[in-house]
Amino acid sequence: MLEAILSLGGIGLTAAIILGLAAKKFAVEVDPRELALLEALPGANCGACGYPGCSGFAQALAEGRADPGDCTPGGKETVEQVARILGVAAVSSDPQVAVVLCQGDRQHAADKYRYLGIDDCNAAQKLIGGPKHCPGGCLGLGSCLRVCPFGAIEITPQGLAVISREFCTGCTKCVAVCPRELIRMTPAAAEVHVLCNSHDKGAVVRKYCSIGCIACHICHKAAPQAYIVEDFLARVVYEHHGDAAPGVEKCPTKCIRDFAKGYPAGSSFLGPASSSKPDIAA
Amino acid sequence: MIKQYKTFRGGLHPPDCKAGSAHKAIEDCPLPEELSIHLSQHIGVPAEVCVAVGERVLKGQAIGRARGMVSVPVHASTSGEVVAVEPRPHPSGKTLEAVVIRPDGIDERHGALSGADYRSLSPEQLRERIRGAGIVGLGGATFPTHVKLSPPPEKSIDTLIINGAECEPYLTGDHRLMVEAAAGIVLGINIFRRALGARRVCVGIENNKPDAVLAMRQACRETGIEVVALATKYPQGAEKQLIYAMTGREVPSGGLPMDVGALVQNVGTAEAAAAALSSGRPLIERVLTVTGPGVAEAKNLRVRIGTPLSHLIACCGGLKGVPAKIIVGGPMMGTAQLGLDVPAVCGTSGVLVLREEDLAVRPEGPCIRCGRCLQVCPARLAPTTIAAYARLDRMSEARAFNAMDCIECGSCAYICPSAIPLVQSIRHAKASISAKRKKH
């Protein structure tokens, strides 16, 4: 009995000493700032910074290879906190959110053929440029929805991608995946947008979409500072987005939307008043 | 004893539906009111237009100049006036530059065209003539023939294989050509043989065309050309599968037929090369099949390049019922069209019209792990695995499972009892992988 206790205890003690020494000898030195940085980052591991997860980004920050402003999902607070830990000045640009520049769902825009393939916009785009007649319209197969780490994108029952302005953190993953390049980064403060991506002439647009921009210049006449029309497509001049309101009312095809007054038809996202930011670290 | 026909591993046999046109002699399709001849009649850089609007062109006159190595000139397919040079719809679904000719009905031949005895020409001269005549692979891939006939010096080609398999359901153009123009095909084969210096020459024909096998055997007597009857199985006419069936050699992953000393040419290409050498006529027409339950009468037609599909359908008695799907090429690998205003190009091997009741559109179900796609894949891939990775956007894994070796024959999607669009997912993976490769 005693022998057993002594031999087992002896083995345990020897192993403990060896392990203790090894832990001291082979300890990996971690920059204490790196731990603090990891604590400060959102922990969503979205990859928007260009590093594989928040720990990679924290390491890069500690080594001075990355810029605090690269964490777009973290927002202004995170950038300031990171800058404080690193002891540098916080340079944070205005927050940006992604916007789908299209409202041509199944009810508004015509298809040129019936698509029966896999639910992937990039695969559909390869079949004669996608099933939509409009060369720039949303295909609604949800490639953007699947890459969004923040649950900020939904596909409406009528087949249109809509991005929540409250949940979007500006990571730009959806911008990169869209084959039709119709998701754009815009200042989060700007609520008015021209939701069309067709550069066709008005007469052509009218044939395939009832809610597209026909380049009629009425918005530009209503608010010359806030809108320009280029290459048969109107867009908001975001430096003057505050003056854009008159164009929303005047637009004959209703392709200009004020997101403060609601999301496109069929969307389940609600206006800013009822929103709460989701806990992205969860 | 049951005779064992040569074939490859995998594959399947869809209902071939060839009875409607297999016994119809090739008819000359009358000239349409307008021909739109695309400057991209081949893989590679499109030809450069060399005629102006308003100019009168003659049959066989070059209207597009070849640009670069993998390019061939394009010729007017009849005499008439050039009425426009503008982008027109192409069977690939894109809108590409085309020369529009209004035929004058005289069909006047260009004076400079003349034939020559191929035996008096060197391999180099033969290749130059074939290039000048704008000859491309008529099997559908439209790869310029002179490039195929110029292998790099370190790759010697000992076996020339002539593809008369025509494994796609519905298509019968090559079949009729072998029955009716066997002598022309043999002349073309001899031209290729001289240009290459190949020792062994063999013609592979599926055994569901006994009259074609017989006609080719008769025409090949005392020429040293073997005519081999192959098992009737899709995709017997695919390049790598045909090489395996005929020689037992396996083209390595990512390799080309010349890596195993073989070269494949379609029977239609051989006939076109023969016409180019014997009478100087460039590639201005081809034989194709207009068929399907949506066409009044299925026919094999000799068609001028640039003839609109609507004119071809009209020559076959028009449409029957409401068309739901129009396919250029065969039903397995062809491309669906948006309308009938596209013209026939060099790669157009057939026009297939299906009605709503002929389409079996089923909703996609879950994979039941039956393994049928593995059994039929002629490239010995695992289609479900690659497709699953492709749909998760994990392209490096799809690549590790050899997605790039897929020949896009569609056998896996055809056999799948759950109607999973397997081949489309794999195509998507292939395109993403090559796009990534280009970027780096």
Image (spheres, grey):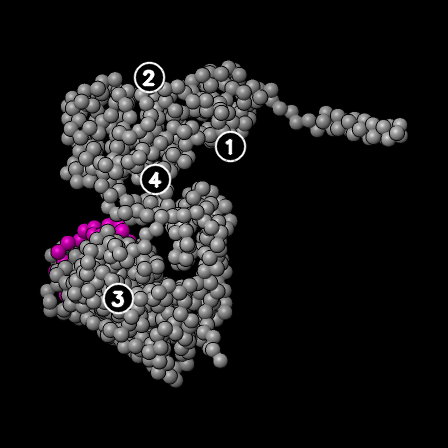
Give yes or no for residue B186 being in the magenta stretch.
no
Q: Residue at left 30%, top 68%?
A: B18
The residue closer to the viewer here, B256 or B127, is B256
| Chain part drawn in magenta | B79-95
Q: Which is in the foreground here, disc 3 or disc 1?
A: 3
- Say which residue label 4 marks: A141
Q: Residue at left 24%, top 62%?
A: B293
Magenta stretch: dominant secondary structure: strand
- Say which residue label 1 marks: A52
Residue A2 sits in which quadrant? top right
Q: Amino acid at mark 4?
A: Leu
Q: Residue at left 17%, top 26%?
A: A251
Residue B91 sits in which quadrant? bottom left
| Secondary structure type for disc 3 | strand
Where is residue B104 drawn, in percent x and y? 10, 64
Q: Single out the residue that lies furthest toward the bottom.
A: B222
| Secondary structure type for disc 4 | loop
User: Could you give the CA–CA distance between mark 3 and mark 2, rounded to whole angstroms?
Assistant: 64 Å
Q: Chain of mark 4?
A: A
User: Could you give the CA–CA distance between mark 4 and mark 2, rounded to whole angstroms?
Assistant: 29 Å
- Say which residue label 2 marks: A273
The residue closer to the viewer here, B187 or A107, is A107
Where is residue B203 drawn, in percent x and y? 39, 74
Q: Amino acid at mark 2?
A: Ala
Which badge, 4 or 2, is on the more N-terminal residue?
A: 4
Tags 4 and 2 in contact by the CB under 8 Å rule? no
- Say which residue label 3 marks: B289
Q: Chain of mark 1?
A: A
Q: Chain of mark 3?
A: B
